[in-house]
């Protein structure tokens, strides 16, 4: 087990799935965690943790949440940008409102949180891990807007890594394959999903199964740890081999 005692870690989008597993993994490693998520009903704090209800696509809400965070901690060591929504729709089915919501959560939230956190991360020589997707690198029918949002996160990560390298701030992203989370299950609710059945989706992964949220959490911890001290600007695939076929 990694020892991250004393590290202050903010997970943006950490109430469910990969984000919740990541927050738990950091706590197991001894870190203090703060979690921003739209699904929280109220602020909660206790034993090395803070949870705040925040719509991460809303600039004013993000500003207010960071102002609250800086009253809780006077610095930050790790920012994990993990909030995401899926949109299963062909281009012709995609409305402007759906596009704006998707980009707001999957891309604008990353911009807003990085901008708010960067001054503190420069002071701590901290790091950022963004959650992109294996679909940043390949096309997928009915995921046109989603794939665009995740490809943008990958190149945002690379360029920000260049901007911050001189300050010792590392910026990376994790690109999961299909991970068994509420987000993934929603695509198959009561119908065949965009990639057929769950079994069809499993068949697209050479390792022959869906990933588990904890497996992505482990990669995020690695990328933010001293073990990855020479890793920046990388897009780490954890996709069970989805993209190598
Ligand atoms: N599950 C997969 O197969 C998979 C694959 C590749 C990438 N991802 C990415 O991983 C990340 C986590 O997804 P997950 O599968 O754990 O899904 P999830 O639905 O379990 O978790 C997503 C979290 O984001 C939060 N969120 C959504 N909109 C928000 C907003 N406006 N403001 C604040 N929080 C918001 C949700 O409340 C939720 O807690 C997402 O960025 C997703 O795109 C998931």
Image (cartoon, rainbow, N blue to C red):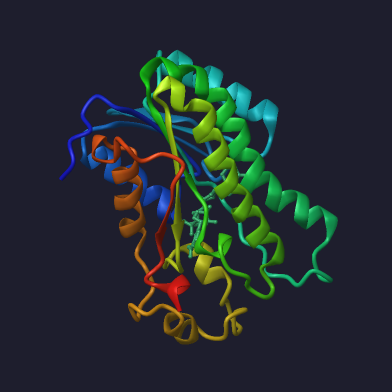
Q: Quadrant of the N terminus?
A: top left
Q: Quadrant of the C terminus?
A: bottom left
Question: In this orientation, which residue lies closer to the viewer: 179 or 140?
Answer: 140
Question: In this orientation, which residue lies closer to the viewer: 176 or 20?
Answer: 176
Question: What residue sits 81% from the left and 70% below the top?
Answer: 93
137 in relation to 202, above or below: above
237 sits left or right of 108 in the view: left
150 in relation to 81, above or below: below
Is residue 55 something that shows in the picture? no
Question: What residue sits 76% from the left and 55% below the top?
Answer: 99
Residue 70 percent coordinates (x, y): 47, 16
Residue 130 percent coordinates (x, y): 49, 44
129 sits left or right of 218 in the view: right
Is residue 203 something that shows in the picture? yes
243 sits left or right of 87 in the view: left
52 in relation to 63, above or below: below
Question: What residue sits 26% from the left and 38% below the top?
Answer: 27
Question: In this orientation, which residue lies closer to the viewer: 49 or 18?
Answer: 18
Query: Which image quadrant is residue 240 in?
Result: bottom left
Residue 219 percent coordinates (x, y): 33, 51
Question: In this orientation, which residue lies closer to the viewer: 213 or 219?
Answer: 219
Residue 170 percent coordinates (x, y): 41, 33
Counting labels gives 0
51 in relation to 135, above or below: above
């Amino acid at each position: 087990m990694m020892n991250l005692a004393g590290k202050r870690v903010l997970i943006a989008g950490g109430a469910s799935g990969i984000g919740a597993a990541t927050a738990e993994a950091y706590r197991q490693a001894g870190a203090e965690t703060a979690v921003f998520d739209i699904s929280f009903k109220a602020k909660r704090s206790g034993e090395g943790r803070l949870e705040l209800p925040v719509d991460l696509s809303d600039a004013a809400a993000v500003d207010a949440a960071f102002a609250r965070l800086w009253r809780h901690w006077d610095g930050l060591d790790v920012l994990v940008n993990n909030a995401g929504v899926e949109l299963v729709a062909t281009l012709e089915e995609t409305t402007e409102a759906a596009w704006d919501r998707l980009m707001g959560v999957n891309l604008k939230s990353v911009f807003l949180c990085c901008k708010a956190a960067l001054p503190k991360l420069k002071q701590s020589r901290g790091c950022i891990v963004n959650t992109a997707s294996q679909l940043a690198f390949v096309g997928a029918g009915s995921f046109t807007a989603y794939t665009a949002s995740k490809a943008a996160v990958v190149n945002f990560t690379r360029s920000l890594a260049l901007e911050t390298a001189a300050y010792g701030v590392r910026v990376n992203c994790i690109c999961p394959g299909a991970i068994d989370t509420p987000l993934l299950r929603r695509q198959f609710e009561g119908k065949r999903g965009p990639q057929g059945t769950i079994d069809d989706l499993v068949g697209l992964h050479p390792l022959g199964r869906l990933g588990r949220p904890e497996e992505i959490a482990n990669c995020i911890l690695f990328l933010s740890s001293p073990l990855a001290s020479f890793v920046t600007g990388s897009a780490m695939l954890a996709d069970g081999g989805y993209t190598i076929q």
